[in-house]
Amino acid sequence: MDALEILSDLENVFPYFQPIFSADEQRVIAYEVLGRYKTEGTVISLGPFFQDDQIPDEYKFEVDLLLVNKALEKALGLEEDIFIFLNRNAELLMYGHGEPFLQELLAYEKKGLSLRRIVLEISARNYSGDLNQFDHLLQYYRTYGIKIAIASIDSDSHYFERIGQLEPDILKINLQALKSTATGVNFNDVLFTLSLLARKIGATLLFENIEMSYQLQFAWKNGGRYYQGFYLHPPTAEFIQRDLLKHRLQEKFHDFIAYEKRKLEAVYTTAEYFQNSVQEIVIKNKSAGYHDLFQALIKKMDQIVFRIYVCDEDGFQKSANIFRGKDGWSIQSDYIQKNWSWRPYFLENIIKMRHEQKGILSDLYCDIETGETIRTFSFPINGEDYLFIDIPYQYLFEHDQLL
């Protein structure tokens, strides 16, 4: 992209606005400002211009400032609860120590645009400057009410570290990876972790690049409050009617809710089945040892489970593993006295079972030995011992609402 051509033709540089929709209101709550340039009757993205390391920062800043001015001038006519997202990489934000950009924003505050409506979507990827100074500048901006969003996960290994350092208001997650059939459970697990982290630091999840219905469903299921992408609405030169998709989103959410309810009912039914079956077997074998209890369980659930063992309330394993492999059932005695209290939710579930005297069906997780996605049914045998029954992926797959 010819930088000089753009700089000499700034009247054809203008902002596009991509709407961002909220789950709670099913309407537009923000716009992301995107740079566009009209050349020979064709509108093209200015993304390559801003990403080109060969173009001097002062050129980029001049074009960016023009885009910001044009965008905020238009935003003055928006309702006062609509946010404006401005993309800033570290170099651009640090230009002039961040002061020229802030002064432009303050000028629009005098015109009536609250800076609490400004969201800086930042990226420090490949930044060679002082990150501490960059972070201090962001915190300084925050004193004016400006919000901070950290952009997509992608392959940035420092993403989680940056979240911890900045505690952003918004985590923006790129769903481009979901288009790949190679995307596995790991991506889902990372997003689950992010949703927990966002809850801990009080951040909102925004999912971008939603291009299909299943991606919207994925975003909704994984705690996304804000949504953005061509499936919802492409970037345009003008603002759209806020409630444009309200009815459509309500219908979509109704479908998502109905689907999740069916899955939850399936999980509940499965938990009840295991509760009744295991309770009956435990009562019948109350005075028997672990060996007889396990044999009775295997007889009843041979193709439903693949691992059975007993732990005490502190997580120390009191029995061997009874494990079903390719060659049938076997005894794994080397697991006796191993401790599992370090596992997430282990002690919490023990206390819950002790008080309710009822078994618990776990959520989906990846087994550390087989690598399979499984669930575990835990059951209180008595006041000291707890039975753990691992359910294989094959069974969950055959009852797909358990996945």
Image (cartoon, rainbow, N blue to C red):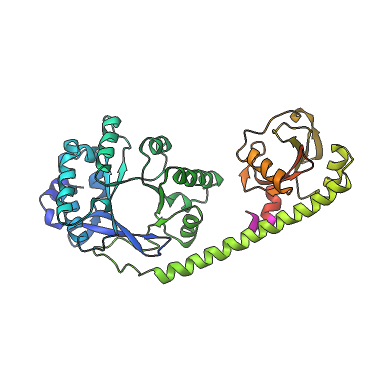
Task: List the single residue furthest toward the bottom.
Answer: 247
Above or below for 321 versus 256 = above
Residue at the spot 41% in from the left edge and 34% down from the top edge = 161
Is residue 332 shown left or right of residue 173?
right
Residue at the spot 44% in from the left edge and 67% down from the top edge = 249
Instruction: Tell me, yes or no, if residue 85 can be seen here.
Output: no
Q: Which residues are magenta?
A: 398-402
Q: Is residue 400 one of those drawn in magenta?
A: yes
Task: List the single residue furthest toward the front.
Answer: 355
Above or below for 364 versus 90 = below
| Residue 191 vs residue 41, the one in the foreground | 191
Q: Could you tell me what secondary structure mostly forms the magenta stretch?
A: helix
In percent of width and height, residue 212 lies at 45, 61
In percent of width and height, residue 134 lies at 27, 34
How many numbered tags mark residues here? Answer: 0
Is residue 378 shown left or right of residue 7?
right
In percent of width and height, residue 330 lies at 81, 36
Q: Is residue 258 one of those drawn in magenta?
A: no
In percent of width and height, residue 217 lies at 49, 59
Which image quadrant is residue 23 in?
Answer: bottom left
Residue at the spot 76% in from the left edge and 52% down from the top edge = 275
Residue at the spot 34% in from the left edge and 63% down from the top edge = 28
Instruction: Tell me, yes or no, if residue 8 can be seen here.
Output: yes
